Image: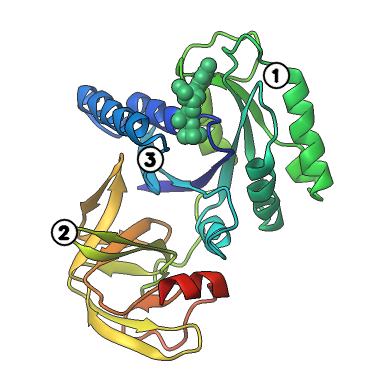
Amino acid sequence: MDIRNIAIIAHVDHGKTTLVDQLLKQSGAFRDHQQVAERAMDRNDLERERGITILAKCTSVVWKDVRINIIDTPGHADFGGEVERILNMVDGAIVLVDAAEGVLPQTKFVVGKALARGLKPIVVVNKIDRQDARADEVHTEVFDLFAALGATDEQLDFPMLYASGRQGWADEELEGARKDLSPMFDLVLRHVPAPDLDRDAPFAMVASILDYDNFLGRVLTGRVEQGRAKVNMPLKVLRQDGTLVETGRLTKLMSFRGLDRVPVDEVEAGDIIAIAGLTDATIPDTVGSPEITEPLKAIPVDPPTLTMTF
Ligand code: GDP
């Protein structure tokens, strides 16, 4: 299946969760739309309860037979290197800005990293339904931000959509038809390149996100940088300095579907996957087939994160 990998960048409360829920509902990610609606509601209830945003790290939707993996980007610098590692897995980004609040610190921080990485973001001026929306001013603010951060001419020529995640529409025109989110899906397919990676090389991925699951234990998420992975294949894990960390078998191989990780038998270069079953592998190790002799180049983990990990 054709793939697009994008990061979603926004200051907290600018509407990431609401937009992603609407993208899920309107995409072909599920046949049972009812189920998505309920899941989204559950999540909103949980959010209300805890007063925080719970957005899956990676959400996957299908539009016109293309899988779009959407990776959430933390808006702060607390986790050294995490933003860069996430941006290294994607070929595009959606910068979501609240039409009333405008550009805020977390927008700046991550946009700076995305531009430095050479990505050409899509800008979405969100919450256009707000009474106090100031769409044109916010558009200018975003342009000025890109310019101040040293954007190239190509990056400055960003495509832009007006949207209301809550009402579930996006439009290229401020006074457009405001029908649904299809303009956003279509723009992603048009503007974001498909990952261009070697499917025939030996399998290798960079472990880019580490989390723990009650049932699966240690789960490593990353993009397949080369080759194909099959469940049960032998694995080798290399640290950035080339040290062999462990060898094992790929017992749990997962891909993203909607808000969930689901077991799959095989994946190929370009897809974002999660694997479980390894005991010592961590970020940013290279997980690959036994033929791999060198680790892939990865963003190092900054000392603050090391202190927290060990
Ligand atoms: P996140 O922190 O970026 O994930 O933001 P949320 O999706 O949780 O939204 C933050 C707040 O903005 C919530 O109260 C949402 O209901 C509200 N919100 C989200 N999208 C829209 C929108 O399109 N229009 C308006 N008016 N409010 C929105």
Residue at 38% x, 69% y is: 227
Secondary structure of the residue carrying tag 2 is loop
**Residue 303: quarter of image:** bottom right
Secondary structure of the residue carrying tag 1 is helix
The answer to whether 53 is drawn above or below residue 150 in the figure is above
Q: Is residue 3 left or right of residue 189?
A: left
Mark linked to residue 135: 1
Badge 3 or badge 2: first in the primary sequence: 3
Q: Is residue 211 left or right of residue 214?
A: right
Residue at 68% x, 42% y is: 105
In front of the other: label 1 or label 2?
2
Mark linked to residue 215: 2
Quadrant holding the C terminus: bottom left
The amino acid sitting under disc 2 is: Phe
Q: Position of residue 235 (x, y in %)?
A: 28, 80
Residue at 62% x, 9% y is: 131
Q: How is the image coloured?
A: rainbow
Mark linked to residue 54: 3
Q: Is residue 182 left or right of residue 116?
A: left
The amino acid sitting under disc 3 is: Ile
Residue at the bottom extreme of this rendering = 243
**Residue 234: quarter of image:** bottom left
Q: Position of residue 78 (x, y in %)?
A: 56, 59
Mark 1 in CB contact with mark 2 (< 8 angstroms): no
Q: Is residue 7 visible?
A: yes
Q: Rounded to the nearest whole Å, what is the CA distance between mark 3 and mark 2?
A: 20 Å
**Nearer the observer, 272 or 201:** 272
Q: Position of residue 72 (x, y in %)?
A: 47, 46
Residue at 32% x, 32% y is: 49
